Amino acid sequence: MSAPTPLVPAPTLDALVDLLRGRRLAVLAGAGISTESGIPDYRGPETRHVERRPVQYDDFVRDPAARRRYWARASRGWARVTGARPNDGHRALARLEAAGCVEGVVTQNVDGLHQRAGSRRVVELHGALDRVVCLGCGGRLTRETVQRQIARRNPSWLDVATPTGRVAPDGDVEIEAGLATFDPPVCPACAGPLKPDVVFFGENVPKPRVAAASDVVSRADALLVVGSSLAVYSGYRFVRQAEAEGTPVAIVTLGETRGHRHAAVALDARLGDALPALADALGA
């Protein structure tokens, strides 16, 4: 097993291109790639100081009040998520895939923007907000179907509930007033509680999904991390895997990450600038 190339201090785009040219890439994408589409991240330079209370899996499953709070807030955040559009970073990754440079994209995001930009080989590590699952019978629904049910059960909610903060990566938006009167959606088949098909904090990523992502990394010649702080182990594990397999790691994001010490090249840059330039340089 070969050792990773030493970290390049203050690297240029040329160093990134030199490392990745001629290699088939696995891409690990975090919330930072969607910030330029208007969806804030949890730990980026602009949001590290913002106190957020993301929903916890155990609370959601056990506490009807937690589910009511989540769906009340998320019902108002949904329009902002569906209104987001892929940005130049998403489109650059799709170009790289079309040119045969990308083995697959492992995304920690739940917004679906990679697919809307044209990427086809995408592993949604944390699921997707546009799908909903019943915790009772396991039935699956589209989010649009659930959103229509919310509108029927709460006729004025989507018009009068005013968000007091920004939408979060999981679709939640800060609303406090009126939560007690909100009537949450239920499964039309069994009347069981509904949960967005995403991995909440404290919930395990399904093993088949981890295996699919691991396979993408194993088949690649380099791992390119974009827009992730790697603070959460569900993504960081693939950096450790690449290092163990002797696969070089490159990181492009704003600010320091947990994975910098494992990286051959770490570039501090806006993804909307760096990724299109990288795609151009690699012939995409």
Image: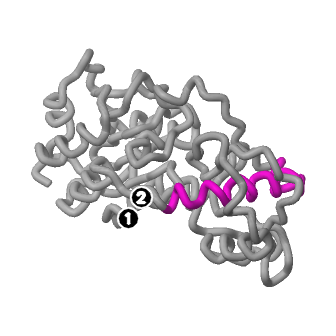
Residue 200 vertical position relative to residue 185 in the rendered view, above or below: above
Task: Count up the numbered dots.
Answer: 2
At x 25% / y 43%, what residue is drawn? Answer: 275
As shown in the figure, which amino acid type bears the numbered disc 2? Leu
Circle 2 sits on which residue?
A: 113
Quadrant containing the N terminus in the rendered view? top left
At x 14% / y 34%, what residue is drawn? Answer: 18
Quadrant containing the C terminus in the rendered view? bottom left
- Nearer to me, 182 or 237: 182
Q: Give the range drawn in magenta.
A: 58-82
- Colour basis: one colour
Q: Is residue 213 left or right of residue 270?
A: right
Q: Is residue 137 left or right of residue 16?
A: right
- 131 in the magenta segment: no
Residue 269 vertical position relative to residue 179 in the rendered view, above or below: above
Task: Check contact, mark 1 vs mark 2: CB within 8 A.
Answer: yes
Mark 1, Cα crowd under 10 Å, few <14 / some 14-19 / many 20+, is some
Q: Where is residue 161 in the image (x, y as percent from the top left)?
A: 72, 54
Circle 1 sits on which residue?
A: 116
Q: Where is residue 207 in the image (x, y as percent from the top left)?
A: 61, 57
Element at label 1: helix
- Nearer to me, 46 or 176: 176
At x 50% / y 51%, what residue is drawn? Answer: 109
- 71 in the magenta segment: yes
Q: Where is residue 237 in the image (x, y as percent from the top left)?
A: 52, 39
At x 33% / y 61%, what residue is drawn? Answer: 117
Give the dominant element type of the magenta stretch: helix, strand or loop: helix
- Nearer to me, 49 or 252: 49
Q: In which quarter of the image is residue 184?
A: bottom right
Of all residues, the one furthest to the bottom in this rendering is 189
As shown in the figure, which amino acid type bears the numbered disc 1? Arg
Element at label 2: helix
